[in-house]
Image (tube, helix red, strand yellow):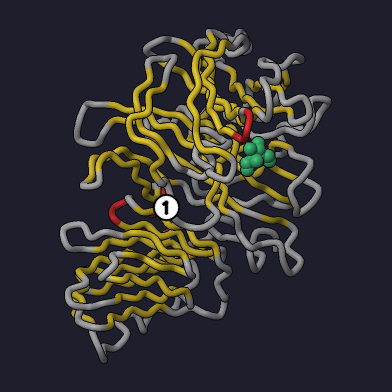
Amino acid sequence: NLYKEKFRGQFHFSPKRGWTNDPNGMVYYNGEYHLFFQHNPYGRGWGNMTWGHAVSKDLLHWEEVGDALHPDQSGPMFSGGAVIDEKNTSGLGSPGKPAMVAFYTGARSWAQCLAWSTDGRTFQKLDKPVLPRINKDNRDPKVIWHEPSKQWVMVLYVERDKGQHSIQFLTSPNLKNWTKVSSVNGGIGGDGYLFECPEFFELKIEGSNEKKWILTGANSEYAIGTFDGKVFKPEIEKLKGQQGRDFYAAQTFSNEPKGRRIEIGWWRTNTDREGMNFNQSMSIPLELKLESRAQGLRLTRMPVKELEGLRDKTYSFGKMKLGKGSANPLASVDIELAEIRLEFAPGTAKDVALNVRGVPVVYNAEKQQLTIDGVTAPAPLIKGKQRWIIYADRTGLEVFAGDGLLFMPVNINIKPENRTLSLSASGGTAAISDIKVYALKSIWH
Ligand code: FRU
């Protein structure tokens, strides 16, 4: 019954067995998306950090292909990213056969190390680190190609004195020799802004030709700014990337074939229970965009289009008014794995509540806030409306509102026997303009 376990997410990646935390080395190579992951192959708790490895052709169905990087004299294999060396700048590939080059932290020497593959399955490690220990805790190298300056750029988390978080920028012509060029500071100590697992990429502002650079840390807080190949100049700082619970250390794919910026994060799940032989999972894949909104420039997150391929049975409901005494319009639904799309104008209602298999998703019209299982986040109306997309798996809900402005992943073990949905409005009348509910198929066969 592997992959059918009671607490295993049915459309979220989780390891066959053992523990996972951060996604690593996300890259598209030879027709496959590669997802490496911080893995403890020997237990359900954190430890023995190894890079697990899974591949997918469609971002949904993942096949584990065996661990890629095992601990060695440099220590356990901590997090990092991967690139495809198209121009063979490293000399590790050969003409027409570019190498996949991965960077990780050897967590005993605290040096940054390189491993490569030319078949997407087997890996070799360079015998020397590409970057020695800097000062204190330094880890989580993420590398990108910077086309205007025709060089590689590494962002690296470095803890400075007094717990000052910083992200260092380094450049390289060949992925092997790195030069420090600048750094930016984040929060201090418990202030998690720009703390560990940096991610750095450029996005076009939707509807314009202007581009900006985005720098994020593990908690998804981010800065928007400019980058000249050496210095990142933040223009807007410390924006919230997600407002849910236990979404962490997200990374994006290099070389995405359609040029999209696709992110997957570690979604801490309550899976270490009742004899499960695996623990933790990833989020669904999210498409990131940079948009000019009423609030200013913002990174938006939406579920990737591919997820529509999991739709099975569809329930559609038309327009309706909901208020005191209204019957539950969703009474006919009997569902486990679900995607729900709801659009409404709160009208005079004070609260609009969608109960998803026992988990209330409540919109407070006065405060324009969304509350799910004790987690509350701002959800301003757009042209007088709320538009929600909700994915429900055994591990909890991923809720999108404001056309991607709000991403709220909320981990909670949903009771298998609860297969109902209900929708209600109180304190007045709300106008529902559209409801679609899709039963989803499992990704595990
Ligand atoms: C983030 C993190 C990283 C580190 C890894 C170790 O969750 O602490 O900074 O590389 O996990 O597993």
Residue drawn at x 24%, y 36% is 206
Q: Position of residue 361 (x, y in %)?
A: 40, 71
Q: Nearer the viewer, residue 205 or 421?
A: 205
- Looking at the image, which residue sits at the far right? 73
Q: Is residue 424 left or right of residue 304?
A: left
Q: Residue at x 34, y 35 (%)?
A: 236
Q: Residue flagged by tag 1: what amino acid is it?
A: Leu
Please give the name of the residue rendered at 56% of the width and 33% of the height, measured from the top-left corner. Answer: 165
Q: Which residue is mark 1?
A: 307
- Answer above or below: position of 88 versus 299: above
Q: For the point 72% across and 39% down, which residue is it?
A: 66
Q: Residue furthest front?
A: 162
In the rendered structure, the answer to whether residue 338 lies left or right of residue 3 reads left
Above or below: residue 301 compared with residue 257: below
| Of 241 and 163, the residue lying toward us | 163
The image shows residue 311 at horizontal and vertical percentages of 40, 60
Can you see residue 157? yes
Q: Secondary structure at mark 1?
A: helix
Decide: few, some or many residues near mark 1? Use Cα within 10 Å; few <14, some 14-19, many ≥20: some
Asked if residue 327 lies left or right of residue 133, the reply is left
- Split into quadrants, the picture shows ligand 1 in the one at top right
Q: Quadrant of the N terminus?
A: bottom right
Coordinates of residue 339 in the picture (x, y in percent)? 40, 63
Occupied quadrant, residue 430: bottom left
Measuring from the top left, give residue 203's x and y in whole percent. 34, 31
| Residue 5, picture quadrant | bottom right
Q: Quadrant of the C terminus?
A: bottom right
For label 1, being within 8 Å of ligand 1 is answered no
Residue 34 sits above or below residue 379 on the image: above
In the displayed orientation, state which residue is furthest to the bottom: 325
